[in-house]
Structure formats: C-alpha cells, structure tokens
Image (tube, rainbow, N blue to C red):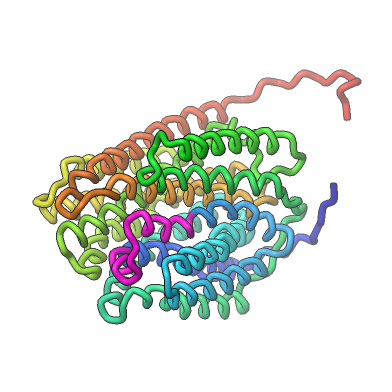
C-alpha cells in the first residue's frame, strides 16, 4: 500500500477564509440552480423534444445518478491530486456539458449530456466543502460557515424557478442551460484568484471495485423505480433488476469491509450520529424533490400555470430555506444538532400534511403555506446534517466526508424524482392532484423520520458525554 504525503498549508487569515467560502459557495449555487431550473422547465422540455413523464424522470435522474455514484471518488481524487485542481476541472466539464444540453437535438443526447453534467458536478459540491472545512478548522466557525453554505441552496432555489420560468417564456427551454455559462466563468476566475490549493496529508488510494459496485447499486435501484410502471413491477425483467441490486449491495458491503482503504468505510455506519446524518440527508432530499416535481407538474399541467407563475409559487419555499439555514448553522454550533433537526422534522411533516388532500380546487394560500413549511424545514435540516457527517470523519479525509453526505443527498434526490414520477406517470391533468396524494404522505413521513433522527442524535450525544470506562491494559502479545 502506497500513500502520498504533503506539507501542511499555513492557515489563511479570517478575511481570506470567508472569501474562500464565498467562492466555493458558487459551486453549490450552480448545482442547486441547475436542479431547480430544470425542474420548472420539465414541461417545456417535454413539449420541445416530445418526452413523456418517464423520459423527463431520466432527464433529471441521469444527472443525479451519476453525481451520486461518483461523489466519493471525486472527493478522494481531490484529496490526492489537489482540491482546487479537481474543482476547476469539474467546472470545465460541467460547463461543456451544459452547452451540449442547450444544443441537444434529441432526448438521447440531452440525457447523455445531463449524465456528463453529473460527472462535472461530482467534482464541485463535495470538493468545495472540503476546501471550506480545510480553511476553517475551528468547529464553531465551521458550523457557521456550513450554515451559510446551506443557505446558498435556498438562494439557488429562489433564483432557479423564477429565473428559469422567465428565461423559458422569453427564450425557450434551452436557455436554462445557457445560464450556467456566466456562473462557471465567474467561478473559474475567482477560484484562480482566491482559492488556495490543498491536499490531504495522507491521500487515499482509489477503490475501483467499490466504485463500480456503488454505481451499480444506485443505478439499478433508481432505474427499476423509473421503469417499473412500464415493464411491470413483477415482470421477469423487474425481478432480475431487484436481484442485481440486492446482490450488488451485499457485495459492496463485503468488499468495503475487507479493503484497507475503502471507498466508503461501512464501519462508520455503526456510529448512530453518523448513520443518522446520512439517513436524514436522504429523507430531506426525498421530501424536497418530491415537492418540486409534484409542484411543477400540478401547477403547469393541472392548473395551466405558466413556467414563470409556477416558479414564483416556490418562492415561499426558497425564502424559508434561505432564512433558516444560517440560523440553523449558528444553532447547531452552539447547541448541537438535536434542536434544528427536530424543527426541520416538524416543519416538513406539517407541510406534507397540508397537501395530503390536494385537489384541483385547493386554495393557492394553502399551497403557498405548505411550500413555506417545507422550505423552512429544509433550511433547518441541512446545516446540522452536514456538520454532523463532516465531524464524523477524520479531518484529513474532508473530501470523502463531504462526499458521503452529498451522495446521500443526491441518492435522495434521484429517489424522490423516481417515486414522484412513478405516482403521476399515467395520470392526466384531471387526475394529477389525486394521484400525487401518496407523494405528500411520503413528504410527511420524511419529516417524521427526521424527528426520529433528532431523538437519536440526542441519545448519542448523551452517550458520548459519559466518561469512557478505563481501558484494560493490553497483554504483551497484543501490543503492536
């Protein structure tokens, strides 16, 4: 086994640390902006290229599946070869793929380009988070920075649907991909000027078997959810895919538990705080993406709203996320994760319950109130989940730490899109609201799961606070 060591970089000044945070937040804004713009543009993309609901699911999930599958390896590559170098490479790949999306002549080209976007995005969010964590070793300052980091996604939610709706009405759906170009150009210039290069003191070796198995598990499990309504849930093809997913998952756990430097150390999931953070990240992003897709389809197909009007309807969700994320970061830094996670679970549960009886005549105020509640819960959730997961791994592996949480988020995103799309795939405009009701029950259930994660974090914190029992002295034969 070979490792690479690098000299420790001097700690930048406080002003430079927060400048680095601002620059790195551009990547989170870019990824979030692209997600929300594409969601609000799905009906227009469907009309423009003749794509049905199942094809639109692949348009979104081709991006999130590749992103989820490669995040951890991208974090490991950044720790080994340089975080700024990998970050800049990701910007270039993401930008080139955005141009292909904007020019795509067919659904196949669009889906393929979205997958390449996922490759570039996998080098952005977790790597930028690793840069921030490396620049801010103080736990309280880091918690505050992660709160700002999380609020950027709320800002992208605010900018994405409204900007996307305006661009679609003025210039057509292809403009939602052109908008990435100026953001990428600005990020490249600012990265070159302000972001220092950093690497892990001890770089991890790449785990190609683990990477292949993780990609297979994620791709097959989400793919069968998307294709299930078409091929039949009990068809031979579906049963074969179920078996492949299970076998690949078991093989992944076995391989990773035996490797000296695994892609994902499965032993970490024995820690209740860490496993709770990962499970919470999946739940939060399932709830968010179910909300975004069902909202887009209901407002534009069932109610006949324009893309701009549908985008404006999500503003309460974005406002709640933007306002509460930095507050949650400060709260997590002072009091720990339990309270913000409990608030997140309560608000998301309430928002989902508001819409379990949705029909075409549900008042706009009820819709907006539900979106505000869900966005508020999302804002409270991100900072404690991210901070807990990052703190659960050694600082030298900050890239991998951020990538595990981001993988859980993107898996939740893909899962939410697949489930929501499956619920309404066969529904016409008149049946959309009724068909979406199980989706809102799922959103409420995700909120309840967050409440359980908050309770588990409280129990784990108490256990951690107890004095450790004295260790028995090792026998001479066990000494290293």
The answer to whether residue 44 is above or below residue 55 is below
Picture coordinates of residue 79, whole percent (x, y) = 70, 57
The answer to whether residue 351 is above or below residue 195 is above
- The residue lying furthest to the front in this view is 236
Could you tell me what secondary structure mostly forms the magenta stretch? helix
Picture coordinates of residue 366, whole percent (x, y) = 15, 50
Q: Which residues are magenta?
A: 42-64
Q: Is residue 57 left or right of residue 424?
A: right
Q: Give whichever of 205, 300 is nearer the camera.
A: 300
Q: Is residue 45 visible?
A: yes
The answer to whether residue 202 is above or below residue 37 is above
Q: Residue at x 44, y 55 (%)?
A: 61
In which image quadrant can residue 150 be found? bottom left
Q: Is residue 386 left or right of residue 107?
A: right
In which image quadrant can residue 56 be found? bottom left
Quarter of the C terminus within the rendering: top right
**Residue 51 lies within the magenta run:** yes
Picture coordinates of residue 353, whole percent (x, y) = 22, 40
**Residue 302 lies within the magenta run:** no
Q: Is residue 155 visible?
A: no
Picture coordinates of residue 31, whole percent (x, y) = 46, 64
Q: Is residue 473 left or right of residue 131?
A: right
The total of numbered circles placed on residues is 0
Q: Residue at x 54, y 34 (%)?
A: 243
Q: Residue at x 75, y 54 (%)?
A: 203
Q: Residue at x 29, y 75 (%)?
A: 168
Q: Give whichever of 164, 449 is nearer the camera.
A: 164
């Amino acid at each position: 086994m070979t490792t690479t060591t690098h000299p420790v970089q001097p700690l930048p000044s406080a002003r430079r640390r927060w400048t680095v945070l601002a620059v790195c937040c551009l990547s989170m804004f870019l990824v979030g902006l692209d997600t929300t713009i594409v969601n609000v543009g799905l009906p227009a993309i469907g009309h423009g290229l003749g794509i049905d609901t199942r094809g639109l699911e692949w348009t979104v999930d081709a991006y999130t599946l590749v992103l989820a599958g490669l995040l951890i390896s991208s974090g490991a590559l950044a720790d080994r070869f340089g975080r700024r170098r990998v970050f800049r490479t990701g910007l270039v790949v993401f930008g080139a793929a955005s141009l292909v999306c904007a020019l795509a002549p067919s659904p196949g080209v669009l889906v393929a380009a979205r997958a390449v976007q996922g490759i570039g995005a996998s080098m952005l969010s977790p790597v930028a988070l690793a840069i921030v964590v490396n620049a801010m070793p103080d736990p309280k300052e880091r918690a505050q920075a992660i709160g700002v980091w999380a609020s950027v996604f709320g800002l992208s939610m605010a900018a994405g649907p409204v900007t996307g709706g305006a661009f679609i009405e003025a210039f057509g759906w292809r403009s939602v991909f052109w908008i990435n170009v100026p953001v990428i150009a600005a990020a490249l210039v600012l990265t070159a000027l302000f972001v220092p290069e950093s690497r892990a003191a001890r770089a991890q070796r790449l785990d190609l078997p683990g990477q292949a198995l993780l990609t297979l598990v994620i791709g097959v499990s989400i793919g069968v959810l998307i294709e299930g309504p078409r091929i039949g849930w009990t068809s031979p093809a579906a049963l074969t895919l179920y078996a492949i997913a299970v076998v690949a998952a078991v093989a992944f756990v076995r391989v990773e538990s035996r490797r000296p430097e695994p892609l994902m150390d499965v032993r970490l999931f024995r820690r209740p705080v860490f496993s709770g953070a990962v499970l919470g990240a999946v739940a939060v992003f399932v709830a968010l993406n179910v909300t975004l897709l069902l909202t887009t389809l209901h407002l534009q197909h069932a109610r006949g709203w324009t893309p701009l009007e549908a985008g404006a309807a999500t503003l309460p969700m974005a406002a709640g996320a933007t306002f509460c994320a930095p507050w949650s970061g400060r709260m997590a830094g002072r009091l720990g994760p339990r309270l913000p996670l409990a608030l997140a679970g309560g608000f998301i549960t309430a928002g989902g319950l508001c819409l379990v009886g949705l029909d075409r005549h549900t008042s706009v105020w009820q819709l907006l109130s539900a979106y505000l509640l869900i966005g508020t819960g999302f804002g409270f959730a991100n900072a404690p989940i991210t901070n807990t997961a990052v703190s659960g791994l050694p600082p030298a592996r900050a890239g991998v730490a951020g990538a595990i949480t981001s993988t859980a988020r993107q898996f939740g995103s893909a899962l939410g899109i697949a489930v929501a799309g499956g619920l309404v795939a066969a529904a016409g405009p008149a049946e959309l609201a009724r068909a979406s009701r199980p989706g809102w029950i799922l959103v409420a259930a995700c909120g309840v799961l967050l409440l359980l994660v908050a309770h588990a974090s409280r129990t784990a914190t108490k256990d951690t606070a107890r004095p450790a029992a004295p260790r028995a002295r090792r026998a001479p034969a066990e000494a290293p």
